[in-house]
Image (spheres, rainbow, N blue to C red):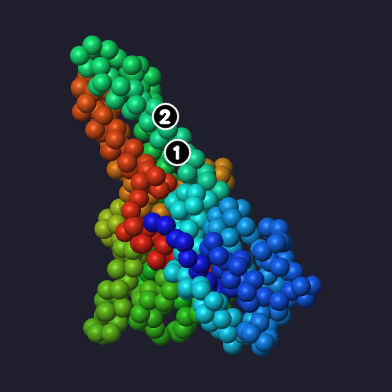
Amino acid sequence: MLYNDSIVALATPSGAGAIAVIRISGNEAITIGNSVFKSIKNKDLLKQKTHTLHLGHIMDDTKTLDEVLVSIFKGPNSYTGENTIEISCHGSTYIQQQIIQLLLRKGCRMADPGEFTLRAFLNGKLDLSQAEAVADLISSDNEASHQIAMQQMRGGFSNEIAKLREELLNFASLIELELDFAEEDVEFADRTQFHELLNRIEFVLKRLIDSFAVGNVIKNGIPVAIVGEPNVGKSTLLNALLNEERAIVSEVAGTTRDTIEDELVIGGIGFRFIDTAGIRETKDIVESIGIKKTFEKIEQAQLVIYLMDSLKFQVSGSESIIEIEKIKNKYPLKQILIVANKIDQLQTDELELLQQGLEILNLKQLFLSAKENIGIEELKDQLLSFVNTGALRNNETIVTNTRHYDSLLKALDEIQKVKYGLETELSSDLMAIDIKEALYHFGTITGQVTNDELLGNIFANFCIGK
């Protein structure tokens, strides 16, 4: 896959703004830019040094389209590895369109989604996992996802995989050499060292695979379902967490009949809160549909907040405990946090009785008043404690990409086959097959092994201009 033409696209968001940046990349990019640019100091862009800025006007024959700044990046010292220029013009949509149409007439074509980054990959400026991290960086909307994307774009994940692949490749070469001298019955690969290497690769792969559980939720946000009986304050709690009137609050039981979702960043981690319909027996068809959706959201959530009314605990506490036990038994792997609401209306002895009554559930508990904003910050701290951010704090490699996760699982499977073959003294030719498969899956992560369909799927998700 080779590209010899020049591409153009708007690199800033579409629409009017203070400025817009139009990017051109390709062997003829500077020549094309020079043909429409008139420097205020009569400079020839073709004779200018790389990484320089030049003030002038974009000219359509004798017509001046705009006063602009042109940045020059000569290949291979550019983002794409090709000659690249960036035109910073005023942000009028009319000006943007006029300049892009002029460049198209001069020999450019419109860039496909992600084509600038695709060219960076094809020209060896980025490997495939780093290129994918560019898209993650653009879409990051909290500190944690930003940190992970930056770490991967700098090559943290790539370097770890590349090192393992290189060591395995060295042993694979020795195994292949043994096959060439099969009649002499010699061993070039030290089996003890090979076994140690396989153990180390297996350990690293398992750590990376386990990190996906954290990475995936950090990248996509942690879904939290707020459930409980009607009129216990679920919508009030959502509003208190978001610090806005997001959900309708009423004393009438069953006000929330559908799920309401919104996002909040706590300590750099994104949480997706889902306010659900109250769980109760009802003959109302619409409300019953909402309750059915509640259980669907519990299924999707990673964390469940079961909210209860502290005032009603002495009267109907046993019913709440039964309901919580049902959720525990139905979703044994879900993390459940019991939150007792309206504690501002309790006496000290009543609060102590409530705490004692909930201890039998053996679940984490929190006591607050959503209406009076008491205990909301403690709830946020508790939510953060459910997320294992140790790897993030230690700047360890965290896998967030489903494609990488799948390749790691397949590579681990092949490594375990090689390990079993080594322990059972399997013939070198059969072991070599499994080693090649493991190397293949390593290669699909960083891009040593790829095809047009894979690249098309990856870069189709990029924005145009990147």
When the figure is inspected, residue 201 is found, relative to residue 101, above or below; the finding is above
Which residue in the structure is indicated by mark 1?
162
Q: Counting other residues with Cα less than 10 Å from the Cα at mark 2, is it few (<14), some (14-19), or many (20 or more)? A: some
Q: Position of residue 340 (x, y in %)?
A: 47, 64
Tell me which corner region of the image, top left, top right, bottom left or bottom right, holds residue 284: bottom left
Which residue in the structure is indicated by mark 2?
167
Q: Amino acid at mark 2?
A: Glu
Q: Position of residue 361 (x, y in %)?
A: 37, 53
Residues marked 2 and 1 touching at CB (< 8 Å): no
When the figure is inspected, residue 72 is found, relative to residue 87, above or below; the finding is above
Instruction: Work out how far the residue at label 2 is from the one at label 1, CA to CA, in angstroms.
Output: 9 Å
Could you say whether the residue bearing mark 2 is in a helix, strand or loop? helix
Q: Position of residue 187 (x, y in %)?
A: 30, 14
Numbered mark located on residue 257 in the image = none
When the figure is inspected, residue 174 is found, relative to residue 105, above or below; the finding is above
Q: Position of residue 270 (x, y in %)?
A: 51, 62
Of the numbered discs 2 and 1, the one sitting upstream in the chain is 1
Could you say whether the residue bearing mark 1 is in a helix, strand or loop? helix
Q: Is residue 233 visible?
A: no
